[in-house]
Amino acid sequence: MQSRLDKSPVATWWWTVDRWFLAAFLSLMGLGIVLSFAASPAVAQRIGLDSFHFATRQIIFTIPALGVMLAVSFMESRQIRRMALVMLCITLVLMVAVLYIGVEVKGARRWVSFAGLSIQPSEFLKPAFVIICAWLFAEHKRQPDIPGNLFAMLLLALVISLLVAQPDFGQTMLVLGTWGVMFFMAGLPWLWIIALGAAGIGGVFAAYTVFPHVAGRIDRFMTGEGDTFQVDMGREALINGGWFGVGPGEGTVKRVIPDSHADFVFSVAGEEFGLIMCFFIMSIFAFIVLRGLNTALKEQDDFTRYAVGGLVTVFGLQSVINMAVNLQLMPAKGMTLPFISYGGSSQIAIAISMGMVLALTRKRPERRKQMGFAPPARAMPAE
């Protein structure tokens, strides 16, 4: 235990970091490892790998993810902005490169390989995009003559264009929704809200018309016809588990779900540990989002408010989309469950995002002074 009198960087970090956030993130990481042992052996055996191949790699991914999250949490706001700018430039270049040299999977190019490692640039683009947009919104509010909102719109258009070109409709909607929430926090007029809502509906209709795979997923969701095997099995796993589950390692439906270790790990949790576990997982995500938004609303600094609000929004929307697909509440979409689903790019990118949340929500003397909690001045000694 660190003493409050200790002024070392680690001690200062420990007494200023939001330990509720930290505990929630560590809990999700731990659940990811536990559930990987439950969900991945059947998948590994089916494709001829060692039973614990994916579980071992999940641990390997989690260790650097934890290190990255803690390292980022030590940063100051200015360092966060600089890191985000570098990340944004690099990921935009990779987003263009992936269209030409990316690995094609199921008709989409979203991955690029370097030295045997596969990277999904869009995962790293999201936290950088949120931070830079938050900075642009904050600068416009601080000095209205700075066209920060216009630049944020142009950046949004660029990012959306690159995502649609892959194509990645799910990430597109995720980025659009997060940007809309941030713009609303920045004082978006109601006329803009109506216009953006209409544009979003128009975008969905356009995607349905232009992209056959999008139309196919929506049609299968609406009619129940076609190849719905995986989502049907995901729902069946949840039903089979009941309230308390069939027990660790005893799940049977999970063995036939192709992506049980990735997009459908939530269904595996329901089958083996029951709906009680599902509610527990949902409560952790809800706690992170609600605490993040509550902290953002109380924050006096505009940049911090928009950044924290945007980061927890994209985190929450991604988790909602994943769980809704598992529950057949929306069309199937390859969206991971943060910190829990298998995936190296996703783990590291989410760790960077939540490291930023930890960094921006730390208690700092200058913030207390802005909020009116400056320490009282010392009394002058009597003559």
Image (spheres, grey):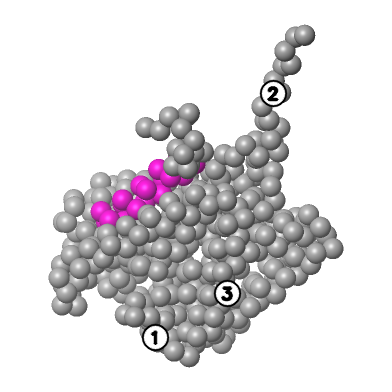
**Would you name the residue on which mark 1 appears?**
103
Q: Give x and y (percent) for residue 31.
A: 31, 52
Element marked by disc 1: strand
Among the two numbered marks 2 and 1 on one chain, the one whose residue lies closer to the N terminus: 1
Please name the amino acid that badge 2 sits on. Pro
Q: Give x and y (percent) for residue 82.
A: 59, 62
Q: Kindly report which numbered mark, 2 or 3, lies closer to the viewer in this rendering.
A: 2
Please name the amino acid that badge 1 sits on. Val
Residue 243 in sight here:
yes
Q: Which mark is residue 376?
A: 2
**Would you name the residue on which mark 3 appears?**
89
Label 2 crowd (10 A; few <14 / some 14-19 / many >=20): few
Q: Which residues are magenta?
A: 17-35
Rendered view: 295 above or below 34:
above
Question: Is residue 58 left or right of 284 when viewed as pictured?
Answer: left
Q: Nearer the viewer, residue 227 or 358?
A: 358
* Residue at 60% in and 52% down: 77
